[in-house]
Amino acid sequence: MVQSKEIPNLSLLILCMERKDRCSPLHRLMLGLLLIFAGGNAIAADYYWVGGTGNWSQLSHWATTSGGSTFHTAVPTAVDNIIFDGNSFNGPSQTLTFDLNVTATNMTFTGVTNNPTFAVGTRTVTLSGNYSHVSGALDWTHTNTLSIGGNVLLNNSAA
């Protein structure tokens, strides 16, 4: 699922910057600030963990699809969705080490197999959206904060 925020129509800004005689200084300032704060397209992407054991910062684990071999070029950000599923951990006793603080929108666990360990340690995990653990068993080891701004769904069928 990819969502995007629309950016303002930049043609007015370009016209205003090119033809300064057509726009007041206040108008140019307001349009300039709008461009700065809009920051371009803010696109939410789905990030699928693949390949078993690894560090959060390793891009070779963040696929664009479940079990996929096309990888994202950056770690998940605050607007992204993080998904763990049956293709995330391919063997027993695998560990995802949180070597960065994590901020994302949603985190979903569906069909996670092999009982992986999530070694969060002293890192923080902040979700502005939902935490959904539909099925599969895993172990969280942490000494810091898991902050969830949305709903928490726990329906672990592998109890």
Image: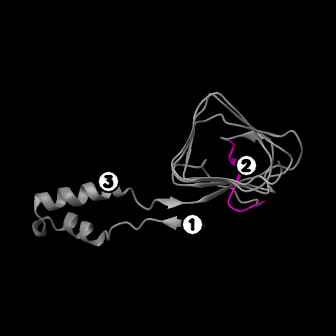
- Badge 1: residue crowd in 10 Å (few <14, some 14–19, many ≥20): few
Q: In which quarter of the image is residue 48?
A: bottom right
Image coords of residue 130 (percent x, y): 58, 53
Q: How far apart are marks 3 and 1 (CA)?
A: 23 Å
Q: Distance between the residues labelled 2 and 3?
A: 32 Å
Label 2, on which residue?
61
- Mark 2 or mark 1, earlier in chain: 1
Q: Which residue is drawn at 82% across and 49% down?
A: 89
Label 1, on which residue?
2
Say whether residue 77 is left or right of residue 54: left
- Badge 3: residue crowd in 10 Å (few <14, some 14–19, many ≥20): few
Question: Is residue 147 shown in magenta?
Answer: no
Q: Nearer the viewer, residue 82 or 18?
A: 82
Q: Which of 101 and 34 is in front in this view?
A: 101
Tag 2: amino acid? His
Image coords of residue 82 (percent x, y): 64, 53
- Badge 2: residue crowd in 10 Å (few <14, some 14–19, many ≥20): many
Q: Which mark is residue 36?
A: 3
Tag 1: amino acid? Val
* Colour style of the rendered protein structure: one colour
SS of the residue at dot 2?
A: helix
Image coords of residue 99 (percent x, y): 65, 34
Q: How far apart are marks 2 and 1 (CA)?
A: 19 Å
Q: Which residue is drawn at 53% across and 60% down?
A: 44
Q: Evaluate if marks 2 and 3 touch, with contact meaning CB atoms under 8 Å apart.
A: no
Q: Which residue is drawn at 67% across and 41% down?
A: 56
Magenta-colored span: 58-67
Question: Is residue 61 shown in magenta?
Answer: yes
- Mark 3 or mark 1, earlier in chain: 1
Say if 138 sits above or below 151 in the image: above
Say whether residue 13 is left or right of residue 101: left
Quadrant of the drawing holding the N terminus: bottom right
